[in-house]
Amino acid sequence: MKKLSEKRLTNILKDKTSGSSEILIEFHNHLKKEQKLFFLVPELIAITKKQFVSFQNIQVYLDEMEKSLHREKNLVPFFTRYDSIFQNNLIELLNNAKKILGQYSTFLTLSNSKTVLEVLQGINSPKRKIKIYVAESRPKFEGRILAKRLINVKIATQLITEAMIPEFLIKSDAAIIGADIILKNGDIVNKIGSRSLAILCKELKKPFYVIADKKKFSNRNSFKQKEMPPAEIWRHHPDKIIVQNFYFERVNRELITRIISD
């Protein structure tokens, strides 16, 4: 890892508050700009795959980068192709989302997703103002990041705790989340709390939508939770109290109203 001490790259690899799409685009843009890092690509691919094992779109990107490097010995065409992919996927995803979500005006979401932000920004308009309730998402509180970004693009936003979700879901037209993996059987993997939200939506008869680009579709059905440091939940907890910390969980397809993709 010593070779990869370059500060910006290290920060991207340690990012625990951004969604997978945002991390991927940051990684792509940085590596494209810093061509001096090209000689590190094989090592970098291995490290990044291990770091973001739960992010399907990043795994696909790295697999394709590896193939391109073996085939062309030059990553410039790969970066150019992905610039176009990112742009076209977003346009198509926004168009599809507007058709389905345009009928709603109040949403509840959780965590921090660049894709969800872009979709909400796309359906908000002077003629149809929307309102968003954002659950703060422990232990990293990345919901606060999304709330700030929504306010910055002039979308009415209220931050809530996870414990407040039932009360505010009643006031919402629909719930909307991103996804880190869409498994082969239609289940999804996303930030912890997503399954509770989906179950509540079913109980309260609220639509539960998942927003994700096609690169997040996987050919596998397995998902193994990775336990994170307990200190992120409770730094100095008594020894006899077991503290578990998981970032991601599986949501059954039966709980999902629809997956909106490009």
Image (cartoon, helix red, strand yellow):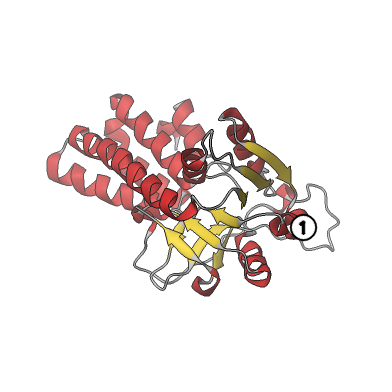
Q: Position of residue 95 (x, y in %)?
A: 37, 47
Pick the quarter of the image with the N terminus.
top left
Q: Nearer the viewer, residue 8 or 261?
A: 261
- The structure residue drawn at horizontal position 40% and vertical position 45%, both measured from the top left corner, is 94
- Residue tagged 1: 167
Q: Residue furthest left?
A: 72
Q: Nearer the viewer, residue 28 or 255?
A: 255
Q: Position of residue 160 (x, y in %)?
A: 74, 47
- The structure residue drawn at horizontal position 43% and vertical position 70%, both measured from the top left corner, is 186
**In the displayed structure, does residue 242 sit left or right of residue 48?**
right
- The structure residue drawn at horizontal position 41% and vertical position 41%, both measured from the top left corner, is 24
Looking at the picture, does residue 52 appear above or below residue 150?
A: below
Q: Nearer the viewer, residue 53 or 78?
A: 78
Looking at the rendered structure, the secondary structure element under dot 1 is helix
Residue 158 visible to an observer of this rendering: yes
- The structure residue drawn at horizontal position 32% and vertical position 53%, both measured from the top left corner, is 60
Q: Position of residue 50 (x, y in %)?
A: 44, 51
